[in-house]
Amino acid sequence: MHQPPVQPPGPVHHQQPPIVHQQHHPQYPPVHQQGVLPPVPPVAFPGPDLSVPEVTSTPPADGGDSTPPEDGQPANDGAAPRPDFPRPPTLERPPYPDPTTAPAFPSPNQPQPPWQQQIAHHQQGTAYPPVPFPPQEGQPPVPDTGWEPDAHEPTPTADDFARRRTMKPADPVAQMGVRAGLRHATFGLLSLAPGRREQEIKKDIDMVRRNFGGLRQVTIVNPKGGAGKTIAVLLLAMTFGQRRGGYVLAWDNNETQGTLGMRAQQDFHARTVRDMLRDLVSFQGASGRVGDLSQYVRAQGEGMFDVLASDESATAGEILTAEAFAEIRDVVSRFYKLIFVDTGNNVRAQNWQAAIDATDQLVVTMSARNDSAETAARMLDHLEQTGRQRLVRQAVTIVSSPSTKRDLDTEAIFRHFAARTRIVLSAPYERSVDTGEPIRYGTLSSATRDAWLKIAAAVAEGL
């Protein structure tokens, strides 16, 4: 058989593959030219079906699922045609009404479906009555509904609401005595409540610390010398200063020479009330500061109070008048909240009478002796005769015990003044006080401190 001659192999060239004509999609014609694409006609996508199908709540005849068949699936083999709606109706998602047939506003008599009954309280005629508004100008007043507040249940105020912020006090824990020792020994594992004595002390301290609502003056009186007036002024001022804080003044209102400055602690100056009265013009009006007042009062250090001493010279000048007392009191009242006034022995003196008229709480002192008690009783008669019955009835009586109680009729003294004053209290004997030296709070015994705390609480109760 004749065969064609074999051509020798030549150089290999890159050739393009032949174009294979395949069947193309009718919308996309084949490419007839290399690198050139024919224009593609726009594709029209089917839009959403805006027609609302008829919705019915009747279940399908075959009892099957009411979900419409997916695309390409047979529709309800041999059964009755099922309604076609986008989503099944539920209580949370009601069926879509026909906008062409549904009324804009439902009739009041028309029954409502269950899903609409859940918001029925927003409609008219429900359990919530309409709120009346105040009538406007040109409009008739709103008719009275007949509602009246309950007289037995007052309307709460903002103060009632603010009281809820009051913090509940912590449970009390013993701080004194054996109970406190057990707590420290057990490192707090055993915490006992305070005993009766500690509870009484805490009650007295709370009474001393309470708010008096303004300036208060306590006047200590007894026309007899040596009745314990100066000691009572110092110990009361010390107790209030220690338990309450500063702004406490002890003022010696003696018309001549007093001893309050001698029994108090000394300061860097020795000025008295007469020096202050001479320079009183510097405190008139809006001038005068608390620093300026320190040039005339004597700070008591640990006592936490100040002393305004009287003239300590035996050859004093004129006796203080009622006007002088009022001017000095007006100045010191700017810087102190509590003033204890020591008085002299002359009940007819003008400054004595002026101090009584400015008194908020009267304190009657005496020793447990008949002469001291009788002088105090006659003074009370004088006060009642001059129209100061209220001061006498609200007064606090302090009976100081001497070093020895022999031949003393203390029961008669307590019985007499208990019938005339608010309360009678006893002050124990204190050796450091009886020496006549300046009194220091740190040298007092615990019995003396507790007794004067009880007296201070009784005084504070009357303020």
Image (cartoon, rainbow, N blue to C red):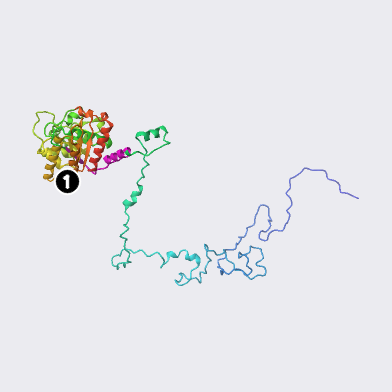
Which range of residues does the magenta coloring cover? 197-220
The answer to which of 42 and 357 lies nearer the viewer is 357
Residue occupying image coordinates x 34% and y 51%: 161
Q: Image height check: is 130 above or below 439?
A: below
The answer to which of 28 and 451 lies nearer the viewer is 451
| Residue of label 1 | 390
The answer to which of 110 and 37 lies nearer the viewer is 110
Which part of the image, by quadrant, shows the C terminus?
A: top left
Report whether 41 appears left or right of 6: left
The quadrant holding residue 360 is top left
The answer to which of 68 and 421 lies nearer the viewer is 421
Assess whether residue 201 is covered by the magenta stretch.
yes
**Amino acid under disc 1:** Arg
The quadrant holding residue 425 is top left
Farthest residue to the right: give it: 1
Q: Image height check: is 299 above or below 208?
A: above
Assess whether residue 199 is covered by the magenta stretch.
yes
Q: Image height check: is 164 above or below 323?
A: below
Report whether 315 appears left or right of 409: left
- Residue 58 image offset from top left, x and y in percent: 58, 69
Farthest residue to the front: give it: 407
- Residue 275 image offset from top left, x and y in percent: 14, 32
- Residue 66 image offset from top left, x and y in percent: 60, 65
Is residue 266 visible in the rendered image? The answer is no
Q: Helix, strand or loop at disc 1? A: helix
Q: Image height check: is 18 above or below 234?
A: below
